[in-house]
Image (cartoon, rainbow, N blue to C red):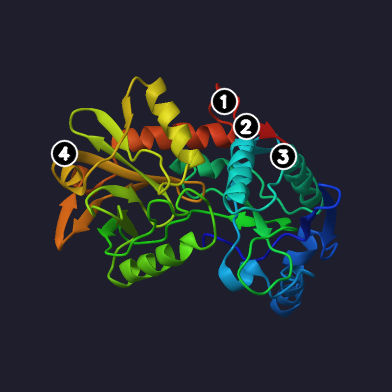
Amino acid sequence: MAFNLAMYPVSYVAQYNPETDSWNESWIQADSVHYDELVAMDESERNAIYAKRNRFDLPLVNYTTQYALGCFEGMKAYPQKDGSLSIFRPEKNAERFYNSMKGLKAPAFPPELYLKASKEFIRRNRELGYMPAYDAEWEKDNFSSASAVYMRPFMYSEGAIGIGVSREPYVIICATTVSSYFKSTNSKAVVTDRIRATPNGTGWIKCASNYVVSTLAKKEAEDAGYMEVIFLDATKRKYVEEGSSCNIFFYLKNGELVTPELGDTILPGITRSSIIEFARAEGIKVTERKISILEVASKCRECFVTGTAAGISSIESITWKGKEHVFNNRVPGELGKRLQARLKGTQYGTVEDVNGWNVLV
């Protein structure tokens, strides 16, 4: 499975205090069971421990649980050959989380606290053995099947009922081990009639409510035999915007690499921005602009999606209005494979980090 729901034992919790304009930080340790002890237990014992780790002493009824007024981040720490772990571009996650909370009219979590807490979070859980070790076997498939630590910082409202915005939000960081994201026998995508984001909405915020439509559309696509779903714009219904939980790229026959331009309906993906920089460093012409599904159907030779969980995942075809448009004879294209190797190699430390994006812990 992609996400392992066996959460790590140590979590971070902070709550904003409006009287002092500060964040009260604390650490919650559900247990002190070392990972080696855990794997030696029988299943029932492990499940009892897992259940305790998913419990937080937080208000059940609030703006987040009742109205999905909350936001989150997805970030990874990658095992390195020397035994350390490297968090990939955490300052970008910190910046986006800050902007998301501001967008939800909540007190925003300071980026410096975000970075400090993230590094300490890794340290505390690593002491209990809850970090995957580097495996040289991962190099054989360019880390497509490699494990990493998936960190989930999220905002959670104080107790409340009725429509309102959070004034004393919590910020929690938890984590689990993650492997390859997409699990499918094919890499086909289909255009959905559903709308993910509307102008002047919250599409640019990584908020919980955005993922309801994405989840429904992806489930419908999977039930129909596809791996992924593609969303078009809300107004003209002709421009490609995103996948279910990832940004999207099209490598055109003229050598141009196109990804939809950022705006209030597009999430500013950190993997997205990394791929843009890697491609430009190769001399590829990268353009951030509107691209219609008609242009994709007639001019695209290679397509892939990007995200923290997905990395780079090739799309073999897109079906639109009942017609399937196939890319690169259904096999991953050379550009996507090169960029994937560069991205994963940088994250796992086998390729020189020329941009200084890795934060070693």
Q: Earlier in the sequence, mark 2 or mark 3?
A: 3
Mark 3 element type: helix
Q: Which residue is mark 4?
A: 299
Instruction: Indicate the quadrant where residue 135 lies.
Output: top right
Q: Is residue 48 above or below residue 240?
A: below
Residue 327 position, x and y percent, is 21, 45
Q: Nearest the camera: 270 or 267?
A: 267
Q: Which residue is mark 2?
A: 358
Q: Is residue 174 above or below residue 80?
A: below
Q: Earlier in the sequence, mark 4 or mark 2?
A: 4
Q: Is residue 268 visible?
A: yes
Q: Is residue 312 visible?
A: no
Task: Give the Cα distance between marks 2 and 3.
Answer: 13 Å
Residue 302 position, x and y percent, is 25, 40
For label 2, count other residues whose C-alpha is less than 10 Å away and answer few (under 14), some (14-19) or many (20+): many
Say what amino acid the circle numbered 1 marks.
Asp
Mark 1 element type: loop
Q: Earlier in the sequence, mark 1 or mark 3?
A: 3
Q: Which residue is mark 1?
A: 353
For label 1, count other residues whose C-alpha is less than 10 Å away and answer few (under 14), some (14-19) or many (20+): some
Give the residue drawn at x 44%, y 27%.
277
Say what amino acid the circle numbered 4 marks.
Lys
Q: Which residue is mark 3?
A: 115
Say what amino acid the circle numbered 3 marks.
Leu
Q: Is residue 109 above or below residue 10?
A: above
Task: Give the Cα distance between marks 1 and 2.
Answer: 7 Å
